[in-house]
Image (cartoon, grey):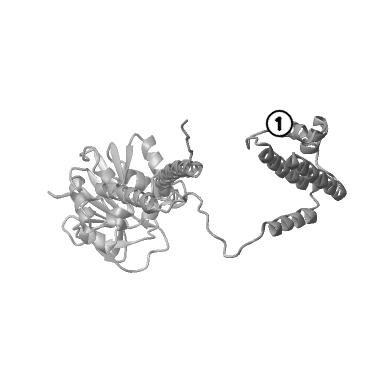
């Protein structure tokens, strides 16, 4: 005969370990999906609150101008970041390139912008600071002085503008002494718009210091709408370049650069390595280990303490069931029955050994629980008498 021993503790521990691993993997996958969804939502909604963004319907956005240009047959393509600007064919002589949020540019990204817009019809830079003007190598300097409170006429000859167009300059002002430069909307020694003629290495450049004429909240004032539409809608296509925060970095962001492309995979591999280390070195619960108690507790003390708990809780039914279960196990041991024997089988064997009525013994071992302490005491005495008779037999 072969005796097979089943290590229940080890099997239970292995099953629970596999269950924990499955749950950890499921939670990691769920966290990854949630993080990806959050990133996508943030990327899609972040621009809707940016100033002079063509998709921003708020007061500071420029959605109204973008839709008017589209209604007038000018296709508007929004390029968010230089990666999107470099995507696709370069601008041609029928394309105007406008740059808002120019303060996000660096020297490297400004050079890339000039190289990309070389073949365009016109490059419009909105509210550039002195650093951006230098990075773009434009012969334009920032001018000081307060802005006028009243409207100012264009008073210049520039394609897309009329000399009697009127705006209220409320932004940066510039001046230029370059040959062929045209200053419009001038006040004092400054102007709100400076246009530079095309050269061999760049197209016509318009430096606009008053970005308010593009905003949704200001575009209906005076001649702001006409000036904005005629200045940006001279060609068939408009590339609206909105630099991102990454464009302010000195990293090479040209089409041949591998640095931005490698950031994502490196972060992903680092996360995977960290998770693998956690699974490898993480402590796991093993099987239960029995340890000696620092003090010896007698069985009678444990029984009495449990009895006092039952008495305090007045749970006579549960106490009676515990007495019946214990007597049934002891009777099965006396009678040589297996531990898995049912109460009815033990009652039948006990009745035969004690020469009692089988029905009364079955009722004693499997009946309903006592409802009072007196009934519980009576049940305990009857069970004790039955055990003594069976043990004597």
Q: Place residue 32 in its image quadrant.
A: top left
Tell me residue 107's x, y (percent).
21, 58
Q: Is residue 389 visible?
A: yes
Q: Residue at x 69, y 57 (%)?
A: 302
Q: Is residue 390 above or below residue 163?
A: above
Q: For the C terminus, which image quadrant?
A: top right
Relative depth, front residue between 228 and 320? 320
How far across and how far down the image is residue 228, in percent?
35, 47
> Can you give x and y, in whole percent of width and height, for residue 375 in the image?
86, 46
Disc 1, SS? helix
Q: Position of residue 225 (x, y in %)?
A: 40, 46
Along the line of sight, the residue nearer the viewer: 159 or 138? 138
Residue in the foreground of this view, choosing between 363 and 9: 363
The residue furthest left is 200
The residue carrying mark 1 is 345
Residue at the farthest bottom position: 145
Image side of residue 254 versus residue 226, left or right = left
């Amino acid at each position: 005969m072969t005796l097979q021993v089943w290590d229940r503790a080890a099997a239970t521990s292995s099953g629970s370990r596999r269950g924990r691993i499955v749950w950890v993997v499921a939670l990691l996958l769920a966290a990854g999906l949630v993080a990806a969804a959050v990133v996508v939502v943030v990327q899609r909604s972040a621009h809707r609150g940016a100033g002079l963004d063509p998709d921003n319907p708020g007061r500071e956005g420029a959605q109204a101008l973008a839709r008017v240009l589209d209604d007038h047959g000018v296709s508007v393509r929004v390029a968010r970041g230089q990666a999107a600007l470099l995507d696709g064919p370069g601008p041609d002589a029928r394309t105007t390139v406008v740059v808002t949020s120019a303060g996000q540019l660096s020297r490297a990204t400004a050079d890339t912008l000039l190289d990309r817009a070389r073949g365009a019809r016109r490059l419009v830079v909105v509210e550039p600071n002195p650093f951006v003007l230098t990075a773009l190598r434009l012969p334009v300097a920032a001018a000081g002085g307060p802005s006028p409170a009243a409207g100012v006429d264009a008073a210049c000859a520039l394609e897309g503008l009329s000399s009697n167009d009127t705006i209220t300059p409320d932004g940066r002002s510039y001046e230029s002494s370059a040959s062929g430069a045209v200053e419009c909307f001038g006040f004092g020694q400054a102007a709100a718009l400076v246009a530079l003629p095309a050269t061999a290495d760049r197209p016509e450049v318009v430096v606009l210091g008053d970005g308010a004429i593009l905003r949704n909240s200001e575009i209906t004032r005076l001649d702001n709408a006409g000036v904005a539409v005629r200045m940006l809608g001279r060609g068939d296509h408009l590339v609206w370049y909105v630099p991102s925060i990454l464009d302010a970095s000195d990293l090479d962001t040209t089409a041949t650069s591998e640095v931005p492309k490698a950031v994502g995979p490196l972060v992903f591999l680092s996360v995977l390595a960290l998770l693998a280390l956690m699974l490898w070195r993480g402590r796991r619960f093993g099987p239960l280990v029995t340890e000696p108690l620092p003090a010896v507790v007698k069985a009678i003390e444990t029984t009495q303490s449990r009895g006092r708990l039952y008495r305090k809780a007045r749970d006579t039914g549960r106490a009676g069931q515990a007495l019946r279960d214990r007597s049934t196990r002891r009777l099965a041991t006396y009678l040589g029955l297996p531990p898995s024997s049912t109460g009815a089988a033990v009652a039948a064997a006990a009745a035969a050994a004690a020469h009692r009525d089988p029905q009364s013994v079955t009722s004693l071992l499997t009946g309903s629980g006592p409802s009072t302490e007196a009934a519980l005491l009576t049940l305990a005495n009857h069970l004790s008498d039955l055990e003594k008779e069976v043990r004597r037999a």
